[in-house]
Amino acid sequence: MSGTGARENVFATRMALTNTKLRLKGAQTGHSLLAKKRDALTTRFRAILRKVDEAKRKMGRVMQLASFSMAEVTYTTGDIAYLVQEQAKLATFRVKAKQENVSGVVLPAFEVDRVAGSGMFLSRRTFSSQAYTCPDFNLTGLGRGGQQIMKAKEVYAKALETLVELASLQTAFTILDEVIRATNRRVNAIEHVVMPRLDNTIKYILSELDEMDREEFFRLKKVQGKKKRDNAARDANLEEHQPSAIDNAIGPEETGSVDLLSSKDDDVIF
């Protein structure tokens, strides 16, 4: 869904403009932080990808050597894998899990904890990656069979360590892949939907406020014009009626010449 031309349904007020600008600023800040997080995760993802490729190549070589070592043990000592497996009681290898934080993403990491001073042999019948303790086999069989067993033990121990390392890298690779996809979707949504919509809303509010300002200015001009016309009409009316008012205040005796001899005063009664 694109945000081109879309806007939010808000009232065009100053408060709505301020709130929309604050939301746009927050969206820009969030977009910047998510973009930095995406770049950091992508960098770590590429580094893990290279390590996964190296670990897989190493795993192939180690398993090849382990298979040859198992073949040499079978050739020199015979089928003693079942006996060794029955004598094993405790695990030589223990896997410990820890967590690693990468830009807010928790990645599990597995480590191998090898118990010192105990032998380890892998069952040829099951070909599982479980480790078992058993006595050393330096003197087992004829034709240096014990040495071949010890060599196979070390090779399979190396293979087990590589397998745990590969499992840790593969798990981190899968988690980072999902998180990077989700972060990309959020960045694209903010960049192409949220920010354009808020920008269009701000433009709409500004245009409406400008239109309201123009209407208010036009209304004020009309009011001022009407007041001026009213004042002019009142002044003209006052100018027309001003001489008669003065004549009424002065009286008819003062307006023209009066014959004082012919005039008769009123009688005064005491």
Image (cartoon, grey):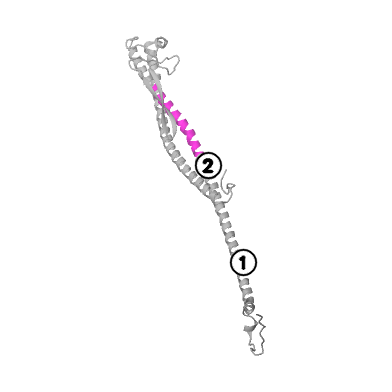
Q: Position of residue 238 (x, y in %)?
A: 62, 74
- For residue 98, above or below residue 250: above
Q: Residue furthest front?
A: 270
* Towards the viewer: 230 or 262: 262
Q: Quadrant of residue 258?
A: bottom right
Assess whether residue 93 is covered by the magenta stretch: no
Location of mark 1 (residue): 226
Position of residue 258 relative to residue 223, above or below, is: below
Foreground residue, 25 or 97?
A: 25
Kindly identify which residue carries mark 2: 189
Image quarter hosting the C terminus: bottom right
Determine crowd level at label 2: few under 14, some 14-19, many 20+ residues with C-alpha closer than 10 A: some
Q: Residue 121: x, y in percent?
A: 38, 15
Q: Amino acid at mark 2?
A: Ala
Q: Amino acid at mark 1?
A: Lys
Residue pictured at 48% horizontal, 46% vertical: 25
Position of residue 176 measured from the top left corner of the image (x, y, whole percent): 46, 33
C-alpha span from label 2 to label 1: 54 Å
First-in-chain label (2 vs 1): 2
- Tag in front: 2 or 1: 1
Extent of the magenta region? 160-185
Q: Secondary structure at mark 2?
A: helix
Q: Is residue 176 magenta?
A: yes
> Label 1 crowding class (10 Å Cα cut-off): few <14, some 14-19, many 20+?
few
Assess whether mark 1 and mark 2 are in contact (beta carbons under 8 angstroms). Answer: no
Residue 43 position, x and y percent, is 42, 37
In the rendered structure, the answer to whether residue 55 lies left or right of residue 13 reads left
